[in-house]
């Protein structure tokens, strides 16, 4: 994916390149913009004279304040809408071994019925969207990842959209990054409670993963990287915007302190028991606990660690994934996940589980089930 113009200093970029070759503290997550030993620049290479070189780790980044401590967007009560995002459809014609990729737009749905309300428009330059998305707690503001470059050179760019009181989406607002970030794969993303920061997790070239925090107004970014964990997902902002919860390698719930200006290890909250993996995690509205899924069992654990409490237990339907990717609304009372083109709603305070069909305007029922958020 083509790089954007860098807003970072060249010396820090070289330092990140040197630091990316090894992680001397196993299990640590290091701040890409933290002070690093000075490194002598390599001699110029004629092979790279026409463009910026690609690095095994992202360039040093420019966001001075990664925390999101503004006033939270107010929750609007039980959610009235949810948004779905799906992977592009791939079709093989005849004996061809090359698939034809057809993008499908994200859509807004009525939360009570699953009925299609509207497709979400894309900013200029995007030809489709990823199946990853995130919702703010107000049930009106959503972050999505748009696809660029078609099949030849696929990449990802982020944008925000806000729904009106009738659920109709407004004009999409692209987030233009000031630092290079060659995004082509995305593990997860999360929108802060105040709507000012977007966190996302991606793999790193050569192994490992990174968490990035992006200021949606300025496009400036701050990265943390790890060579110990190959996958980082399940991102969730603490309500006070000072930390991020995440899932490491599907086995560990952890919290990353964004207030630390230097290299910091994520604090482990809970490890998976046996072979049951984790996928999604979110904070309770007061920030005192984490809600997560161990397989298809939804549990709650204090953010500082301690005994867990089962909130709901679901038998996986036929063909379901071993893990549960879910979205909890801003009140913390309603959990939503999708399977088999149905949206399943679990009341976390107890009560009957309900489901509704997910209807879309384009290619209904084709391809994998969408991801959903509210």
Image: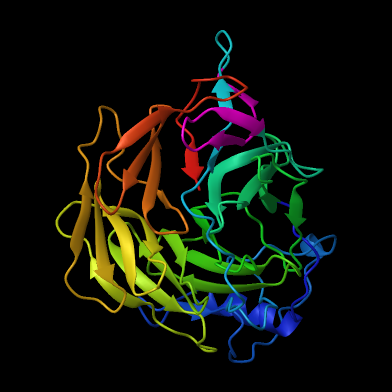
In percent of width and height, residue 276 lies at 20, 51
Between 20 and 86, which is closer to the camera in this rendering?
86
User: In percent of the image, x 40 and y 73: which residue is there?
Assistant: 287
Coordinates of residue 222 in the picture (x, y in percent): 62, 74
- Left or right of 40 on screen, residue 47: right
Residue 158 in the image: state x and y as whole percent: 67, 53
Name the one closer to the observer, 361 or 212.
361
Inspect the magenta stretch and tell me whether residue 341 lies in it: no
Image-quadrant location for residue 65: bottom right
**Place of residue 334 in the rendered image (x, y in percent of width and height, measured from the top left):** 38, 50
User: Can residue 151 be seen here?
Assistant: yes
Give me the residue at 29% from left, 65% from top: 252
**Quick one: which residue is furthest to the right in this view?**
50
What residue range appears in magenta?
Answer: 97-118
Please state if 332 lies on the left or on the right of 47 as rendered.
left
Q: Which color scheme did the rendering employ for the protein?
A: rainbow
Q: Is residue 31 above or below residue 361?
A: below
Specify whether 28 is left or right of 95: left
Compared to residue 42, the image places residue 290 above or below, namely above
Q: Nearer the viewer, residue 100 or 290?
A: 290
Which residue is depicted at the point 37% across and 59% down? 281
Q: Is residue 114 magenta?
A: yes
Q: Nearer the viewer, residue 48 or 268?
A: 268
Can residue 205 be seen at all in this image of the molecule? no
Q: For the image shown, how many numbered marks are present on the structure?
A: 0
């Amino acid at each position: 994916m083509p790089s954007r113009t860098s807003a970072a200093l060249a010396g820090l970029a070289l330092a990140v390149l040197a630091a990316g070759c090894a992680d001397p503290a196993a299990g640590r997550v290091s701040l890409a913009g933290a002070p690093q030993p000075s490194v002598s620049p390599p001699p110029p290479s004629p092979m790279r004279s026409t463009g910026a070189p690609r690095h095994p780790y992202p360039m040093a980044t420019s966001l001075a304040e990664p925390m999101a401590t503004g006033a939270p967007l107010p929750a609007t009560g039980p959610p009235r809408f949810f948004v779905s995002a799906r992977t592009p459809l791939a079709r093989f014609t005849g004996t061809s071994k090359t698939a034809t990729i057809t993008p499908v737009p994200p859509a807004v749905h009525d939360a009570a019925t699953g009925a299609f309300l509207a497709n979400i428009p894309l900013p200029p330059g995007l030809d489709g969207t990823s199946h990853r998305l995130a919702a703010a707690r107000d049930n009106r503001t959503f972050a999505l990842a748009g696809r660029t470059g078609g099949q030849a050179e696929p990449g990802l760019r982020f944008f925000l959209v806000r729904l009106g009181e009738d659920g109709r989406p407004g004009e999409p607002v692209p987030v233009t990054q000031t630092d290079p970030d060659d995004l082509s794969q995305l593990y997860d993303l999360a929108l802060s409670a105040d709507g000012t920061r977007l966190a996302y997790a991606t793999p790193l070239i050569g192994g490992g993963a990174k968490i990035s925090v992006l200021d949606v107004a300025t496009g400036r970014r701050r990265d943390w990287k790890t060579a110990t964990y190959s996958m980082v997902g399940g991102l969730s902002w603490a309500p006070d915007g000072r930390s991020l919860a995440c899932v490491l390698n599907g086995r560990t719930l952890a919290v990353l302190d964004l207030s630390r200006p230097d290299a910091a290890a994520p604090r482990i909250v809970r490890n998976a028991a046996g072979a049951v993996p984790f996928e999604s995690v979110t904070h309770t509205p007061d920030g005192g606990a984490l809600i997560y899924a161990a397989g298809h069992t939804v549990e709650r654990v204090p953010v500082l660690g301690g005994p867990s409490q089962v909130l709901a237990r679901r038998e996986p339907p036929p063909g379901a994934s071993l893990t549960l990717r879910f979205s909890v609304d801003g009140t913390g009372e309603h959990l939503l996940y999708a399977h088999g083109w149905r949206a399943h709603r679990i009341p976390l305070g107890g009560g009957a589980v309900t489901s509704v069909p997910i209807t879309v305007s384009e290619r209904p029922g084709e391809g994998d089930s969408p991801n959903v958020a509210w």
